[in-house]
Amino acid sequence: MQIEPYLNFDGRCDEAIEFYKIALGATVRLLMRFKDNPGPPGQSPPEVLEKVMHANLNIGGATILVSDGRCQNKPNFGGIMLSLSADSDEEAERLFKALGEGGKVTMPMGQTFFATRFGMLTDRFGVNWMVVRQV
């Protein structure tokens, strides 16, 4: 069994994918748009045909699934955090800075009793992140 986070960007998925490519080195394994749906014509409203119906991203060996969902520009990631483990203090700092671009730091990066580097932030899309470099 495997758990894979599925993030619904509610209309900003293309922007999020490009951001995560730059910030985290994400690669796109699969991307399907609503226009690619083989269902009956008119199944999706014309204004969403170019939006992302489903995409599969690889980030550091992990799979993150993403979508534009209902395309209402009201993403909500409350109660969920993604934890990103770095291989070095320098990488933790770089990832934290990159993810925080246009976002909000909720706990500045620093040393803790359980990690040489740890910080929390909400990125520009509202996704909550913890970046950690374990002891």
Image (cartoon, rainbow, N blue to C red):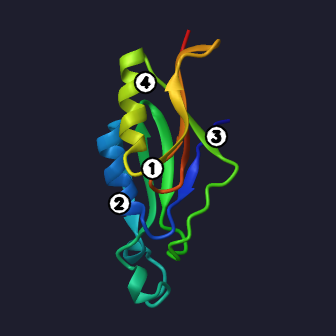
Residue located beneath label 2 in the image = 15
Labelled disc at residue 103: 1
Give how far apart the Cα atoms at labels 3 and 2 are. 24 Å
- Please indicate, yes or no, whether residue 132 appears anywhere in the rendered image: no
**Label 3: how many residues lie within 10 Å, few (<14), some (14-19) or many (20+)?**
few
User: Which residue carries the number 4 mark?
Assistant: 92
Amino acid residing under circle 3: Ile
* Foreground residue among 112 and 40: 112
Residue 135 in which image quadrant: top right
- SS for callout 1: loop
Q: Nearer the viewer, residue 22 or 117?
A: 117
- Measured as percent of width and height from the top left, residue 40 is found at 48, 86
Q: Tell which of 119 and 43 is nearer to you.
A: 119
Which part of the image, by quadrant, shows the N terminus? top right
Q: Circles 4 and 3: CB distance less than 8 Å?
A: no
CA gap, disc 4 to disc 3?
A: 24 Å
Compare marks 2 and 1 and give the one earlier in the sequence.
2
Dot 4 crowding, Cα within 10 Å, few <14, some 14–19, many 20+: many
Q: Is residue 78 above or below residue 109?
A: below
Asked whether, in this view, residue 82 is left or right of residue 79, the answer is: left
Q: Tell me residue 96's x, y (percent).
A: 43, 33
Q: Earlier in the sequence, mark 4 or mark 3?
A: 3
